[in-house]
Amino acid sequence: MKKRYLVIGAAILVIALIVGCGLFSHYGKERFCDGDFHPRFHGKDFSEHVLGRLDKKVEKLDLSQTQQEKYQEIRRRIEADLAQMSKDRKALFVEIQKEFDREDPDVNVVAGLLKGKIQRFPVMMEEKLDHFLDFYNMLNKDQKAQVIEKIREKIEKVHTG
């Protein structure tokens, strides 16, 4: 039962992150597709924003030195994943823009590009869950209880929201 809550909570967090990215896609000249973000990031790029929030959450767990070292290694992997996702997203939008810049754009080509991106989604989700599990498994009993409580709160918000 605990494992189920853990996986569901991690999946909800990852999906919320992805949906949050999508929310920035419609903001005028500073829209997501141009590689910029809504001004509320105050000069930070998205990965800095995500990692900063992650650091604040992890700080509350009061990690030991050994745990902190493991967290920094996991954080580096997350940072590399975010950088690659950003690079891939920008490349995808360049390809989509090229197609729509043609006199007679082929929407089937665009759909194919997007389908290719969607097909990679399960692998990306697995990687994010693996990062979460690596982090969770290094925690002590009390820290795990804190994380589970936060996940329960998030699940409750989803049910009542």
Image (cartoon, rainbow, N blue to C red):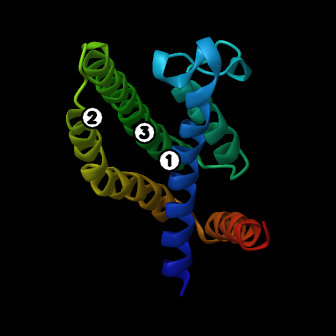
**Residue farthest along the right direction in this orientation:** 160
113 horizontally vs 25: left or right: left
Could you say which is closer to the camera, residue 80 or residue 142? Answer: 80
Q: Quadrant of the C terminus?
A: bottom right
Q: Quadrant of residue 48?
A: top right
In the rendered image, the vertical position of residue 159 relative to residue 44, given as above or below: below
**Residue farthest along the bottom direction in this orientation:** 1
In the rendered image, the vertical position of residue 130 relative to residue 64, given as above or below: below
* Amino acid tagged 1: Thr
Circles 3 and 2: CB atoms closer than 8 Å: no
Q: Residue at x 65, y 63 (%)?
A: 147
**Residue 16 percent across, percent down from the top left:** 58, 51
Residue at mark 1: 66
> Tag on residue 78?
3
Q: Residue at x 70, y 39 (%)?
A: 56
* Amino acid tagged 3: Ile
99 horizontally vs 33: left or right: left
Viewer-nearest of discs 3 and 1? 3
- Whole-angstrom CA distance, mark 3 to mark 1, is 19 Å
Residue at mark 2: 107
Pointer 3 or 1: first along the chain: 1
Pointer 2 or 1: first along the chain: 1
